Image (cartoon, rainbow, N blue to C red):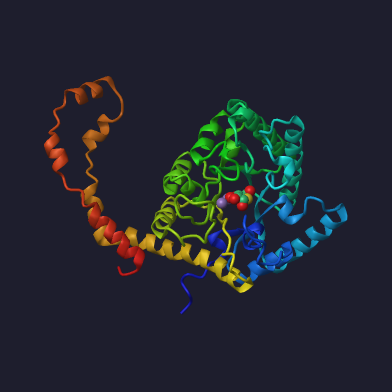
Amino acid sequence: MPDPYQPKPRDKFTFGLWTVGNVGRDPFGAPTRPQWSPAEIVDLLGEVGGVHGVNFHDNDLVPIDATDAEAEQIKRDFAAALKRNKLRVCMATTNLFADPAFKDGAFTSNDAEVRAYALHKTMRAMDLGAEFGAEVYVFWGGREGVETDASKDPVLAIQRFRDAINFLCTYSMDQGYGYRFALEAKPNEPRGHMYFPATYAYLALIPSLAYPEMVGVNPEVAHEHMAGLNFTHAVAAALEAGKLFHIDLNDQQFGRYDQDFRFGSADVKSAFFLVKLLEDHKWDGFRHFDSHAYRTADRDDVIAFARGSMRTYLILRERARQWNSNTQVKKLLRRINRTSSDLARLGTYRKSHAETLKAMDFDRDRLSGRSLPYEQLDQLTMDIILGVK
Ligand code: GLT
Ligand code: MN
Ligand code: MN
């Protein structure tokens, strides 16, 4: 019997060169894995099987100090690896955080020359992404923040960031790239205080942009959990606003540093509700695993990590379907949701509806006396997640 949790390219699972290619460095220790070339990473993804595509930062593919000749060779090797592994590039982004030139931010830097360099670098990275057919362009403002608010007016920082995104939207249209921009939030790392620390901050910014229809968000599980927020709710806000352009799946214990663990490995219940949300709403974007294998992993274990990420998603997708069709769940949902067409009609504002509502008598004891069997529903959910139902 075929494995029901075997991923297929149509599942739209993607990995970044920096994710499976992570060398296992941390702030306290040196790399534990070799730096594989982009072509070697693509070969590894081919070996993983069922992957849809690959994503990169400009400098994951072409090192920041590469000569033109070196860049051409790397691109040729990468293109050949994509072809032999039947993979494509889905998303591209700019590394605006690693180089010391960005120590005080990129688009929000206090130095006009650094801001100009950030635009220059991003346009060139957009050219590179477009050369490989990337559809989504991610912006993670890795250094857009401060340690001390003495250094920058935070209103000015927002304005500088908006100006940069407006400029780059126009550049994309001018070049005919057709990119959809996805803004990615993260709180308090690596700067002491990051601007736009949660997905909601970007959702508030987008309507103020010159081309709001081009711009959405790229929420990441770990980032919202670092801030102690419910990730599924953040994704729901983006979905409801038509702004979920991309997603970064990984996992994380609450209250810790950015752990970037394998999807579903830390909080399987949250992962279940997330997968259920994406599948219930038939979201058809790229499901990108922005995570990396434990520092202890070798190449075989990195492959197991990549397979495990997709497998957990597919198991949870199956569980979500089971939840939706479970008769006990359906029965409980009917009990919980009390509908009334009369009351629904009154919910549309009219002067007469307002008057009717104001004149109504409500029996608060009756309202509070109704049973809400959420314990039963939640345990049923646990049974389904744990595979005993
Ligand atoms: C970095 C960060 C990620 C972002 C990447 C895109 S780089 O690994 O922690 O969450 O998505 O710039
Ligand atoms: Mn991310
Ligand atoms: Mn992260």
Residue 85, by quadrant, is bottom right
Q: Is residue 123 left or right of residue 286?
A: right
The correct choice, above or below, for 213 with respect to 272 in the image is: above
When the figure is inspected, residue 293 is found, relative to residue 129, above or below; the finding is below
Q: Is residue 49 visible?
A: no
Q: Quadrant of the C terminus?
A: bottom left
In this rendering, would 153 be left or right of 113?
left
Relative depth, front residue between 43 and 88: 43
Q: Residue furthest front?
A: 28
Q: Residue furthest bottom?
A: 1
Q: Is residue 70 above or below residue 207?
A: below
Task: Look at 43% across and 61% down and name the residue there.
Answer: 317
Instruction: Tell me residue 216's x, y (percent).
Output: 56, 40
Task: Please give the name of the residue rendered at 70% of the width and 39% of the height, measured from the top-left corner.
Answer: 172
Residue 60, percent from left and from top: 71, 55
Q: Position of residue 10 (x, y in %)?
A: 55, 61
Could you say which is closer to the camera, residue 18 or residue 327?
A: 18
- Decide if residue 203 is in sight here: yes
Count the numbered circles shown: 0
Q: Nearer the viewer, residue 148 or 296?
A: 148
- Residue 346: x and y in percent read 25, 29
- In depth, the one of 287 and 225 nearer the eye is 225
